[in-house]
């Protein structure tokens, strides 16, 4: 009796899953009814069988009643170019745990409030960043170190990409003042782009992701480096960065080396706090003028 009940449950679950898959498959066909898909996908049952689920045709005709495993459901969602919500609906229909990468709504608001409170107590330059790379706050040491004007947050649209690629913001020109610094800046740019793509591989069909990519298009360097692979390992690329910083006593600019670390404020990676630590003696002097006591700078890394 128990065996039959379990089989009936699996059969009902499978019917629901197949209904969800077929609805999504036909939706994609309609979306490309009047245009060719960039990868020439046709979103047919046979193509889905060949590309994502080798047992799909058998499931449709009843030769198999076994619900595909979780990874196969994820492969199907990738083939069907599902948004995060569509993928999670498929996983839930198959009785699997969905994938929730980022906080939303009130949970996000509380995490941002917590990040702001933590950042306000940090002696180091720091900024709050969301998974869309939008910057939700800067502390005064950060603003002074990178000479960020107060009107930069007009319409709440400042993004890490703007910091790195916009020549009108001081970070870009002060990070590329000679051949060596440009090479290091370029390595960080490539690594950052690839890390963003890797961290959001399951979100690339989401509306926010597509809008962000459109926003990135205004920077030629992002287009140039989008498909370029980083040469070094993560530890090599992230070891330290170089920038020209202003000495408060003389007003002159000197090269300093600093290190950037990420602090998560919840079980999710974002929102998080990007904290900047001094690496060499020149940086420590600059950080002291920013209000970071010398005794706090032991967190820095010697060259």
Image: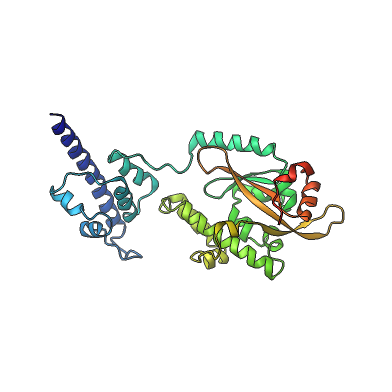
Q: Is residue 256 left or right of residue 235?
A: right
Residue 66 x/y as whole percent:
20, 44
Is residue 169 visible from the viewing direction of this image? no
**Outermost residue toward the top in this view:** 1
Please state, as top left, top right, bottom left or bottom right, where the C terminus lies in the image.
bottom right
Q: Toward which corner of the image does residue 240 lie, by quadrant?
A: bottom right
Is residue 174 visible from the viewing direction of this image? yes
Residue 268 x/y as whole percent:
50, 41
Question: In the image, what residue occupies the spot 21% across and 42% down?
Answer: 14
**Outermost residue toward the front in this view:** 302
Residue 26 position (above or below residue 119):
below
Residue 71 position (above or below residue 116):
below
Q: Nearer the viewer, residue 67 or 120?
A: 67
Residue 253 x/y as whole percent:
80, 60
Please state, as top left, top right, bottom left or bottom right, where the N terminus lies in the image.
top left
Question: In the image, what residue occupies the spot 69% across and 54% down?
Answer: 258
**Outermost residue toward the bottom in this view:** 179
Residue 60 x/y as whole percent:
16, 50
Q: Nearer the viewer, residue 103 or 286?
A: 286
């Amino acid at each position: 009796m128990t065996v039959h009940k379990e089989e009936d449950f699996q059969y009902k679950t499978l019917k629901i899953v197949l209904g969800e898959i077929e609805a999504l498959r036909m939706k994609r066909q309609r979306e490309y009814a009047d245009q060719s898909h960039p990868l020439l996908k046709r979103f047919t049952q046979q193509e889905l069988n060949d590309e994502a689920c080798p047992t799909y045709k058998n499931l449709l005709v009843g030769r198999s009643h076994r619900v595909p495993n979780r990874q196969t459901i994820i492969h199907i969602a990738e083939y069907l170019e599902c948004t995060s919500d569509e993928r999670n609906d498929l996983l839930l229909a198959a009785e699997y745990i969905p994938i929730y990468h980022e906080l939303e709504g009130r949970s996000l608001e509380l995490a941002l409030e917590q990040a702001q409170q933590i950042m306000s107590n940090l002696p180091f330059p720091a900024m709050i960043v969301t998974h869309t790379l939008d910057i939700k706050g800067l502390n005064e040491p950060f603003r002074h170190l990178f000479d960020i004007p107060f009107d930069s947050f007009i319409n709440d649209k400042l993004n890490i990409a703007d910091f790195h690629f916009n020549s009108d913001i001081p970070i870009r020109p002060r990070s590329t003042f000679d051949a060596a610094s440009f090479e290091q800046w370029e390595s960080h740019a490539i690594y950052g782009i690839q890390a963003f793509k890797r961290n959001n591989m399951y979100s690339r069909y989401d509306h926010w992701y597509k809008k962000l990519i459109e926003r990135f298009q205004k920077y030629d360097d992002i287009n140039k480096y989008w498909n370029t692979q980083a040469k070094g390992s993560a530890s090599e690329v992230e070891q330290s960065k170089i920038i020209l910083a202003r000495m408060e006593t003389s007003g002159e600019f000197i090269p300093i080396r600093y290190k950037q670390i990420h602090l998560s404020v919840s079980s999710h990676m974002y929102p998080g706090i990007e904290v900047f630590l001094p690496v060499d003696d020149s940086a420590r002097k600059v950080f002291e003028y920013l209000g970071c006591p010398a005794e706090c700078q032991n967190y820095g890394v010697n060259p």
